[in-house]
Image (cartoon, rainbow, N blue to C red):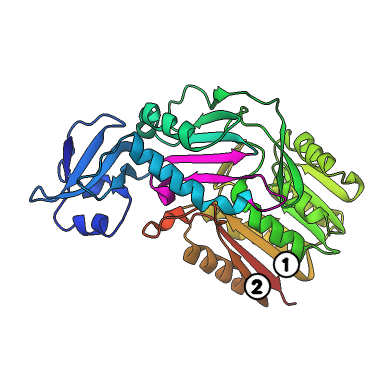
Amino acid sequence: MKQLMLKRGKEDKYLRGFPLVEKDDVFDMPSTDEGELVALVDSGKRFIATAYYGEQNKGIGWVLSLDSTEKIDHNFFVNLFKTAKSEREYYDHVDGINAYRIFNAEGDGIGGLTIDYYDGHLLIQWYSVGIYRLKDRLLPAIKEVFEYKSIFEKRRFRGMETASDFVDGTAPGFPYVVEENHLYYNIDLDDGPMTGIFLDQKDVRKKLRDHYSEDKDVLNLFSYTGAFSVAASENANSTTSVDLANRARPLTEANFGLNAIDLNNNHIFIMDVFDYFKYALRHGLSYDVVVIDPPSFARHKKKTFSVQKNYPELIEGSLELLNEQGTLVLSTNSSAFPQKAFKKMINQTLDALDVDYTISDVMGLPKDFKSHPHYKPSKYLKVVFVQING
């Protein structure tokens, strides 16, 4: 096995459990193939960890084991998958939910790999060439541990040949209906990079429905397929979904239809969010709750949007449409925007606008999205509920 020598003093963070191999920590980077197993060693050639080489984000690989005697073989992966499966047994016994994550990358021991469960249909997502090169070792272990009707995959690294592929089993017809918190949503595992629903927001949708939407007018920005709107509509007076993509309308209407929800009080606008702010002001529209869940980065015509740069504008625009005693639901999945920085931005924005407010709830990833205790970016989802007091 090829050795990667760490710079003096860098070995300690890996011995403490840091999972991402960072290029700047390696003394001299030898020629290494994507997917190759390597041994991290200190300057005295003492074993530190076994990792696989795979360039992803700011790293060049992920630690697999700190045990020098452990073989990275079929049984190693089977044991990791069995542990992950047992930790999700909760969802096997919960009524009204059949879609969740059964393996979450570094949180479950293999950075760069996630597996989602959609009522028996599995979606494997590969986040680097390196982890994809290990497919022949990983797939047999996945098939051995997890029961499935079908398996699909999405390759999310640069140079991918296709965004998604059927792998094994009996493929369902799409769209396919899954259940979450006794509501129904269409998903498609073979249609581009997204599936139709973000499973990491399941608890946030439930919180919105059960505690913040009763008899309220709810505005859902960057609404995608309208999942937040569908959840809120059970108790809300009305919902309004705003998204720039033309396909958002039929996808959102279909989700409302699955749940026998009347569209008369659930409105859909296909337009830029900032343009909608102007439209709503012109038409005297206002809301009791505004959900803001933007992409980390987006480009439309000559305009670009960045969460870290433009989020304050979203808050300011939403406040102009918010009724007294209203609520902002502020969300981001950007790992480059830590929770502390996200909350600081919210506080600074509201303070600068001289707003009297209270943070009523702070949420993160649900239990199936297991995070890594020594790697803060694995806790990427931040959701802050802000109650406006004036």
Q: Which residue occupies 55% across, 70% down?
A: 348
Disc 1, SS: strand
Of labels 1 and 2, earlier in sequence is 1
Q: Quadrant of the C terminus?
A: bottom right
Mark 1 or mark 2: which is in front? Answer: 2
**In the image, what residue type sits under mark 2?**
Ser
Task: Answer yes or no: is residue 111 visible.
Answer: no
Residue neighbourhood size for the residue with mark 2, other residues' Cα within 10 Å, grouped as few (<14), some (14–19), many (≥20): few
Residue at image mark 2? 360
Vertical side of 99 occupied by 206: above or below: below
**In the image, what residue type sits under mark 1?**
Thr
Residue 363 x, y percent position in the rendering: 59, 63
Residue neighbourhood size for the residue with mark 1, other residues' Cα within 10 Å, grouped as few (<14), some (14–19), many (≥20): many
Q: Which residues are magenta?
A: 93-118
Residue 128: assigned label: none
Residue at image mark 1? 327
Q: Which residue occupies 76% across, 48% down?
A: 183
Residue 44 x, y percent position in the rendering: 7, 51
Q: Which residue occupies 59% across, 54% down?
A: 90
Magenta run includes residue 106: yes
Q: Quadrant of the N terminus?
A: top left
Disc 2, SS: strand
